[in-house]
Image (cartoon, rainbow, N blue to C red):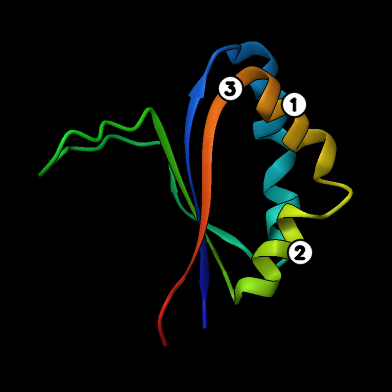
Amino acid sequence: MPAYVIANIRVNDAERYKDYVANVPALIAKHGGEYRVRGGEFEVLEGQWTPDRLVVLEFPDREAALAFYNDPDYAPFRSLRQSVTDSSVVIVDGYE
């Protein structure tokens, strides 16, 4: 069953964030993940939620998603993201 990592990211230091953007796609791919949403324009249809930069990653399963998130090669980039953004990140199981 696929799993999705969904993040809302408010970038506070765009210059330093460029390093994250340049290096993380290869790590996502290493674990079988793909971007489904990477920023882009959105429209709120209901409610008060107004995300800043919405990112949706699809992985083959929860194990692959967690392997990406916990990958030692990702750790310095996760720390970088956390230091230059305000981020909320969740993982959710898809359906078959």
Asked whether residue 32 is in view, the answer is: no
Mark 2 lies on a secondary structure that is helix
Tell me how far mark 3 sits from mark 2, CA to CA.
22 Å
Marks counted in the figure total: 3
| Image x and y of residue 40, in percent | 35, 36
Given contact means CB atoms under 8 Å apart, are the residues at marks 3 and 2 in contact? no
Q: Which residue is mark 1?
A: 80
Query: If you read the primary sequence from the N terminus, does the residue marked by circle 2 or circle 1 appear first?
Result: 2
User: In the rendered image, which residue does mark 2 sit on?
Assistant: 67
What kind of residue is marked 1?
Answer: Leu
Q: Amino acid at mark 2?
A: Ala
- 42 above or below 81? below
Q: Residue at x 76, y 31 (%)?
A: 79
- The secondary element bearing badge 3 is classed as strand
Percent across and percent down for residue 51 are 33, 33
Q: In what quadrant of the picture does the C terminus appear?
A: bottom left
Q: Tell which circle, 3 or 2, labels the residue nearer the N-terminal end.
A: 2
Mark sitting earlier along the chain (1/3) = 1
Location of residue 66 in the rendering, given as x and y in whole percent from the top left corner = 70, 63
* Dots 1, 3 in contact, CB < 8 A: no
Q: Which residue is mark 3?
A: 85
Give the secondary structure at mark 1.
helix
Where is residue 50? Give x, y as percent.
Answer: 26, 31
Q: Is residue 71 above or below residue 65?
A: above
Position of residue 69 in the picture relative to residue 38 (left or right): right
Asked whether residue 5 appears in the rendered view, the answer is yes
Q: Residues within 10 Å of mark 3 (few under 14, many from 20)?
A: some
Q: Nearer the viewer, residue 6 or 38?
A: 6
Please give the name of the residue rendered at 18% of the width and 33% of the height, measured from the top-left corner.
48
Task: Residue 80: name its quadrant.
Answer: top right
Q: Is residue 86 left or right of residue 74?
A: left
Q: Residue at x 87, y 47 (%)?
A: 73
